[in-house]
Amino acid sequence: MRKIASITVALVLVAGLAGCGGGDDAGSTDEVKLAGLWPLSGPNATQGTDVLHGAELAVDVVNNDHPGLDLPLGPGTGLPGLGGAPVKLITGDTQGKPEIGAGEVDRLVTTEKVAAVIGSYQSGVTLTASQRAERLGVPFVNEASSSVALGERGLKWFFRTGPTDETFARSMFDYLKARQAGGDQIRTVGIFHSNDQFGNDGAGVTGKVAAEVGLPVTVNVAFDPTAADLGSQVAQVRSKNPDVLFVLAYTDAAIKLMKTLDQLDYYPPALLAYGSGFADPAFATGLGPLANGASSRAAWSSEIAAKRPAAKTVADLFQQRYGAPMTENSARAFTAVLALAQAIDTAKSTEPAAIRDALRALDIPGDKTIMPWTGIKFDDKGQNTGAAGVVEQMIEGKYRVVFPAELSSVQPIWPMNKAQQ
């Protein structure tokens, strides 16, 4: 039992926690309060709930004994650095709206006295919510927002465990280079993106990397994420007929896009998505066979997890608890919460500055995470330098890893419409 602590240590902790910032009660060793901020209602509620489940499972791993789980804080109960104090996750619902996300940070920090904030899935919400946490002087750990711009603001309290869109873009263009080397003709690319923080930033990064590798972008179409119909926008793409179409879309638009491609009987040779709606379980269940052929970058894969004991154990726990498979989004939330918990445990304090310093010094090797990464270590922008991505393709209703070759489980189906035959 790792939570056994001496009276002397407890007294030292209480003295050290007195007068902490972010909230007067944040340093209580009775429990450590963390805020989880996601879209739990509105059009992205399915994704937000999936992310929440990953975070809840990480809290369960910290608070309860998992003796066979070879991850930090797996065996034993609570945070040993704080006398075995359990972690309590207090959620806020952003509704997918940036202004509500910022307001929830205010409430959770000033009223609930949380020690740190985790969130907020959508890049646009993460933008405002992390700015508010910065103003309040509380660590903000992002799990799944990939906009490059989030790490370029000079914030001192912002940390991101997952890959950026640039990391993902480079993985996908490496995949295209491999396809070219194998004989596929790839001469042009197109970009189809939601007109918001996530989509616009991702489109910019895609164009930048495409230019670096010498692939011209022949069509770049932004769409309203609330649009009822995408027919005219898809027609613009079809008129240029790019060899590869990069897509940035949340769930509703991702489903509409695939249905529109089918209705117009038009498929580019390859569709490469930046996760998000394409990683939502509702994408496959909502489309059925129409989802086949789509490819997406991913920061986590169930196939890779099955080959790693700790990752497989966590995925099995997730399935048992929620009756659904773990996804990229829930795996990223699990990882962010566990990394933050480890930092708090190392800091032996819930004082915000101590947690921030511990996050800056965090160095978790890849085999002590459930992700196919080299590890978790933040640079001076708060970006995890160990995060990486793979490319998956939806084949017969399941995502299969197709790149990189050393991690792949099947050969990709090219062109994509062959996967629907």
Image (cartoon, rainbow, N blue to C red):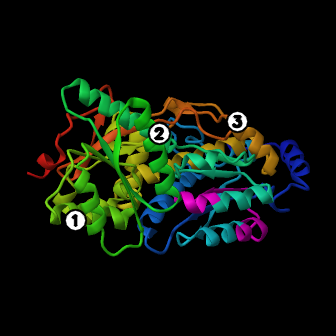
Label 2 environment density (alpha carbons within 10 Å; few <14, some 14–19, many ≥20)? some
Q: Which residue is mark 2?
A: 208
- The earlier-in-sequence mark between 3 and 1 is 1
Q: Nearer the viewer, residue 211 or 27?
A: 211
Q: Is residue 360 left or right of residue 321?
A: right
Depth check, mark 1 against mark 2: the one in front is 2
Q: Nearer the viewer, residue 77 or 349?
A: 349
Going 50% across and 70% down the picture, which residue do you hit? Answer: 40
Magenta stretch holds residue 77: no
Q: Report the quarter where the N terminus lies.
A: top right
Vertical placement of 286 versus 75: above or below?
below
Label 1 environment density (alpha carbons within 10 Å; few <14, some 14–19, many ≥20)? some
* Element marked by disc 3: loop
Res 211 visible: yes
Q: Amino acid at mark 1?
A: Lys
Q: Amino acid at mark 2?
A: Lys
Vertical placement of 106 versus 85: above or below?
below
